[in-house]
Image: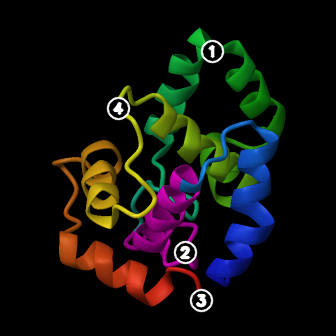
């Protein structure tokens, strides 16, 4: 998918509809998708468990649903999108609204403020700390290369 289409037709309107849009949130989600999937893969390469453009693992998705019990409005909005005939993995790889909301809600669970939209280094650090974590193997160089290649073409 073209990143500009993903931003214009999916990320921005979904975040607006959920009352979760900000330039910082939009950019962080775009940077996350650029790094995680190149806006191309909805299944982790090598048969890993991660799904969707943000490469969220089903265990993380299930954990997010549990945490959202403290925020019924967000939980209801996300659960409304979930097709009861699909399992979590299928929802994460087939439903872009579920992908976007899940990514945004997971980041929203972080008590730290999002970095300024102009702070790419801050975006990298936020992504690494709260998405890829110390267990992930993404490097700063890979992150910025993915953003340069797929940022908004």
**Dot 1, how many residues are within 10 Å of its Cα: few (below 14), some (14-19), or many (20+)?**
few
Q: How does the figure colour the protein chain or chains?
A: rainbow
Residue at 76% x, 37% y is 18
Locate residue 10 relative to residue 90 in the image: left or right: right
Dot 4 or dot 1: first in sequence order is 1
Residue 118 at x, y = what percent? 41, 64
* Badge 3 element: loop
Which residue is denoted by mark 1 in the rendering?
71
Residue 23 at x, y = what percent? 58, 55
* Badge 2 element: loop
Which residue is denoted by mark 3 in the rendering?
153
Image position of 22 with respect to 3: above or below: above
Dot 1 or dot 2: first in sequence order is 2
Residue 48 at x, y = what percent? 39, 60
The residues tagged by marks 4 and 2 sit, at their Cα atoms, a distance apart of 29 Å
- Give 152 or 139, whichever is nearer the viewer: 152
* Badge 1 element: loop
Q: Name the image quarter holding the C terminus.
A: bottom right
- Residue 41's mark? 2
Foreground tag (4 vs 1): 4
Q: Which residues are magenta?
A: 24-46
Q: Can residue 7 be found in the magenta stretch?
A: no
- Give 96 or 151, whichever is nearer the viewer: 151
**Dot 4, how many residues are within 10 Å of its Cα: few (below 14), some (14-19), or many (20+)?**
few
Dot 4 or dot 3: first in sequence order is 4
Locate residue 144 relative to residue 22 in the image: left or right: left
- Residue 112's mark? 4
* Badge 4 element: loop
Dot 1 or dot 3: first in sequence order is 1
- Give 134 or 112, whichever is nearer the viewer: 112
Residue at 74% x, 36% y is 19
- Residue 151's mark? none
């Amino acid at each position: 998918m073209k990143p500009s289409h993903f931003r214009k037709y999916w990320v921005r309107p979904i975040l607006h509809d959920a009352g979760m849009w900000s330039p910082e949130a939009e950019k962080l989600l775009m940077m996350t998708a650029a790094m995680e999937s190149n806006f191309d893969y909805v299944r982790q390469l090598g048969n890993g468990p991660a799904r969707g453009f943000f490469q969220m693992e089903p265990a993380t998705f299930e954990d997010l649903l549990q945490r959202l019990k403290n925020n019924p409005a967000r939980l209801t909005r996300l659960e409304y999108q979930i097709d009861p005939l699909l399992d979590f993995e299928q929802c994460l790889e087939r439903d872009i609204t579920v992908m976007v909301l899940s990514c945004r809600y997971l980041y929203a669970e972080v008590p730290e403020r999002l970095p300024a939209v102009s702070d790419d280094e801050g975006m990298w650090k936020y992504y690494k700390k709260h998405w890829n974590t110390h267990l992930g193997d993404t490097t700063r160089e890979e992150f910025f290369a993915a953003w340069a290649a797929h940022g908004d073409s």
